[in-house]
Amino acid sequence: MSLDAQGSAVPAPRLAATRRTRYKAEIASVSPDSSRNTFEQHETCFLGVSLENSNFTTAKLTSMVRWISRRFDRCVVLVGDSIHRLTLESTQGLPPDRARERALELGRSFVAAEGTVFEEYRGSTDFTFLNCGEVQAGERYAEFHSKLRTFFDEDVAFRSSVESFGHAYHRKRADGLSGAEWEKRIRMSNDYFLEEFAIFACLKEQGLSVMVYPGSFSTLSEIARGEHPGAPKELRDLVVVSLHLKGR
């Protein structure tokens, strides 16, 4: 969830940035398209949280929580702690044990720091927290992950889609990287997405049919649109709602 293929915007002047303290969440896209006018019929959703991602500052998070509170009775806040270790390993060079420790620490810090944002809207929506690490400890996660790994190895179109997202992300940070380091980062990016998708499949199996996220999930959206028929049915049946956060 911290890997984002969208380009970085040119920084605004400091004065303008200090004034932009409120945001409005708007729908950027819904996959599949056929769910655009029906996804609100679901009573529950899950919000994917990427750690150390600028889309999850308090002001932006508030706009998303407000948007969800007007549409869903229940929302599971999926904190991307354990999978964030891969980002820390690839971009900061942390050893695996230290990266996992730091990722779990960041997950706890997020809940502690931003918990009040959710409390404000609990009158309309039941918000509960769930860490990716908790999901990954289950047997069903291991089964979904194994299926996705096999699908990635055997299906050229799916593998190409996953790899292209990693290429777009790391290309902006590739200055000075050796060929070996570049390949390592792409492999870790692939691992990140496969782990993340297996987690999403678990949540869909548990009845959470709508995923909400501030940004694009190109491969996941492709799966929801039916472009990768060999993917797990749980992902093919997922509704992906991408939000745009508009400053005001």
Image (spheres, rainbow, N blue to C red):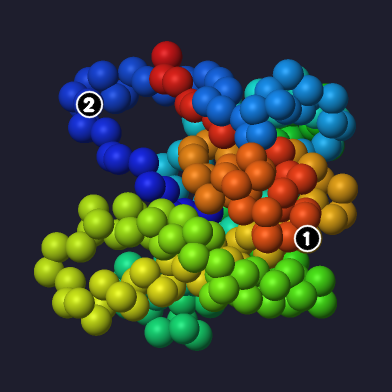
Q: Nearer the viewer, mark 2 or mark 1?
A: 1
- As drawn, is 164 to the left or to the right of 140? left
Label at residue 12: 2
Residue 57 spot, x, y in % from top left: 47, 39
Place residue 68 in its image quadrant: top right
CB within 8 Å, label 2 to label 1: no
Place residue 202 in its image quadrant: bottom right
Decide if residue 51 is in sight here.
no
Say whether disc 2 or disc 1 marks the residue closer to the N-terminus: 2
Looking at the image, which residue is at 60% across and 47% down? 227
Looking at the image, which residue is at 33% across and 59% down? 167
Residue 118 spot, x, y in % from top left: 70, 36
Q: Nearer the viewer, residue 242 or 218?
A: 218
Label at residue 64: none
Q: Amino acid at mark 1?
A: Cys
Residue 216 spot, x, y in % from top left: 49, 40
- As drawn, is 246 to the left or to the right of 113? left
Instruction: Classify 143 as above or below 97.
Output: above
Instruction: Classify 47 as above or below 185.
Output: above
Instruction: Classify 68 as above or below 235.
Output: above
Q: Residues within 10 Å of mark 2 (few under 14, many from 20)?
A: few
Q: Amino acid at mark 2?
A: Ala
Q: Residue furthest left?
A: 176
Secondary structure type for disc 1: helix
Secondary structure type for disc 2: loop
Q: Residue furthest top?
A: 248
Residue that carries the numbered disc 1 in the rendered image: 202
The span from disc 2 to disc 1 (Cα, nearest Å) is 40 Å
Decide if residue 209 is in sight here.
yes
Looking at the image, which residue is at 33% across and 68% down? 91
- As drawn, is 180 to the left or to the right of 176? right
Q: How many marks?
A: 2
